[in-house]
Image: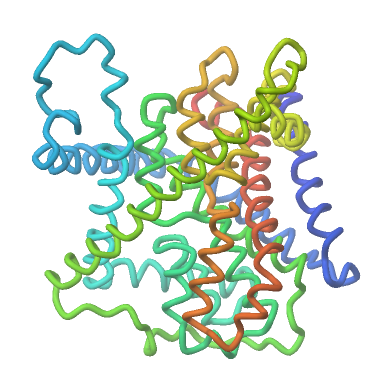
């Protein structure tokens, strides 16, 4: 049954599209056909995934698989780190919640999933999935073959890893296609982080893994749409077939795939851990400086409060009640400034008095993307290696791409806010 909160979410749809149109390089070439097609695709995917009994059973299977993966990872982590990773405690535990240590419960998941992803790629399972999604994107969103494939691969492999699979084509892409790849990379997340986010939210959001997986998949069309609004497609772009013949990601054997995947995962886990340490430290420094000023409204000034005020209208436009919009807006700001990992950790700690279950679900979709300041540097570094001759072009596009990726997840959250509570069992 539809409520006023569902109609309210239409404002989020209009706001995200309108903001991108305002910064468009050619406002006269708004892609109406793509806008309708992308939104319809997103809505249909949500209705199918959460409305059909067979799809619901599949999502429950995904959730169970993620829980099994997390449990298996914890067994390996506990073998190495003992009680720090949830193993047998050598003393009585008065606060069980304190045993959830991010470094030992979340980062190891990234290692295991990266190794598993490499193995599934070597066995051609992920490659077939990427080709399938690439074909769908090519036919429904009007993309050429190579960028359609890279867009699909980004959903599973990540914002820099996805374009690797069309490395030979990167110098031939139009400016609009290059911008689209960067924007979609920031609108989605990788397979390894999907499982990590689901692990963080498992205790506060029912069916967390299903929501995170759905969020990353349906945000890809949103990223394509908003990218095409900001940097319209080149009329000279022509369709091309999908081609994996120049794909760079190859492994010599299954063992080689597992070892290289583990090495890649270690690099990602170290980057995530180091980034969180630095960004949280910097944010704490700023909060201490702001805390020296007189309180406002009876509470000290902080980054979260400031960002909550700035992004509260955007949060409200996604269908979130105004009394919760300040908290939700603060999470949006944290995601943009301090990475989505920090935002998800904070979301998992927010009590039910501040965010109800529906708001928590909507925010999961809004936060599930790589659009943050740290990703700007990662994209510049990654594309500088993949296509060095276009580095200056990437520098000129990357900040707009961050905006497109950030708003793409907000667009996705707004569409979820349009749906009745009963669809998600609320």
Residue 2 makes an appearance in the image: no
Residue 262 appears at what percent x and percent y? 22, 61
The correct choice, above or below, for 219 with respect to 166 in the image is above
For image coordinates 71% across by 73% down, the residue present is: 396
Q: Quadrant of residue 306?
A: top right
Q: Quadrant of residue 47?
A: top right
Identify which residue, 215 or 89, lies in the foreground: 89
What kind of colouring is applied to the model shown? rainbow
The correct choice, above or below, for 421 with respect to 286 in the image is above
Picture quarter with the N terminus: top right
The correct choice, above or below, for 382 with respect to 159 in the image is below
For image coordinates 61% across by 56% down, the residue present is: 41
Would you say 345 lies left or right of 97 here?
right
Identify which residue, 299 or 66, lies in the foreground: 299
Question: Which residue in the rendered view is the most extreme toward the right?
Answer: 28
The correct choice, above or below, for 186 with respect to 123 in the image is above
For image coordinates 27% across by 37% down, the residue present is: 105
Would you say 228 lies left or right of 244 here?
right
Identify which residue, 400 or 113, lies in the foreground: 400
For image coordinates 62% across by 46% down, the residue present is: 336
Residue 32 makes an appearance in the image: yes
Q: Quadrant of residue 337?
A: top right
Identify which residue, 107 or 230, lies in the foreground: 107
Numbered disc total:
0
Would you say 113 lies left or right of 204 here?
left
Residue 412 appears at what percent x and percent y? 63, 46
Residue 166 appears at what percent x and percent y? 46, 82
Residue 178 appears at what percent x and percent y? 62, 77
Would you say 251 lies left or right of 272 here?
left
């Amino acid at each position: 049954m539809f409520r006023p909160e569902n109609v309210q979410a239409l404002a989020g749809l209009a706001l995200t599209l309108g903001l991108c149109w305002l910064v468009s390089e050619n406002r006269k070439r708004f892609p109406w056909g793509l806008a309708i097609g992308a939104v319809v695709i997103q809505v249909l995917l949500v209705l199918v995934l959460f409305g059909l009994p067979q799809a619901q059973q599949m999502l429950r299977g995904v959730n169970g698989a993620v829980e099994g993966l997390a449990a298996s990872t914890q067994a390996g982590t506990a073998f190495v780190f003992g009680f720090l990773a949830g193993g047998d405690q050598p003393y009585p535990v008065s606060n069980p919640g304190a045993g959830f240590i991010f470094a030992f419960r979340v980062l190891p998941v990234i290692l295991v999933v990266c190794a598993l992803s490499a193995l599934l790629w070597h066995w051609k399972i992920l490659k077939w999935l990427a080709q399938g999604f690439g074909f769908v994107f090519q036919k429904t969103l009007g993309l050429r073959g190579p960028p359609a494939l890279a867009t699909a691969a980004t959903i599973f492999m990540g914002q820099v890893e996805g374009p690797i699979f069309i490395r030979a084509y990167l110098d031939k892409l139009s400016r609009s296609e290059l911008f689209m790849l960067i924007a979609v990379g920031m609108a989605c997340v990788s397979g390894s982080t999907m499982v990590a986010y689901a692990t963080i939210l498992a205790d506060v959001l029912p069916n967390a893994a299903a929501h995170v997986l759905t969020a990353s998949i349906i945000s890809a069309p949103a990223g394509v749409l908003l990218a095409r609004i900001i940097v319209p497609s080149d009329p000279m772009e022509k369709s091309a077939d999908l081609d994996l013949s120049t794909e760079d990601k190859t492994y010599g054997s299954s063992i080689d795939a597992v070892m290289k995947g583990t090495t890649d995962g270690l690099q990602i886990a170290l980057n995530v851990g180091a980034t969180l340490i630095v960004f949280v430290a910097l944010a704490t420094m700023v909060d201490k400086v702001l805390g020296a000023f007189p309180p406002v409204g009876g509470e000290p000034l902080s980054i979260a409060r400031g960002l909550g005020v700035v992004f509260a209208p955007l949060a409200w436009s996604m269908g979130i009640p105004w009394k919760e919009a300040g908290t939700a807006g603060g999470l949006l700001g944290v995601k943009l400034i301090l990475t989505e990992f920090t935002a998800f950790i904070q979301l998992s700690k927010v009590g039910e008095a501040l965010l109800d279950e529906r708001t928590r679900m909507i925010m999961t979709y809004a936060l599930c993307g790589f659009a943050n300041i740290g990703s700007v540097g990662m994209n510049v570094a990654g594309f500088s290696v993949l296509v060095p001759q276009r580095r200056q072009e990437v520098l000129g596009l990357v900040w707009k791409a961050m905006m497109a990726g950030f708003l793409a997840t907000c667009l996705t959250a707004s569409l979820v806010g349009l749906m009745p509570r009963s669809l998600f069992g609320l």
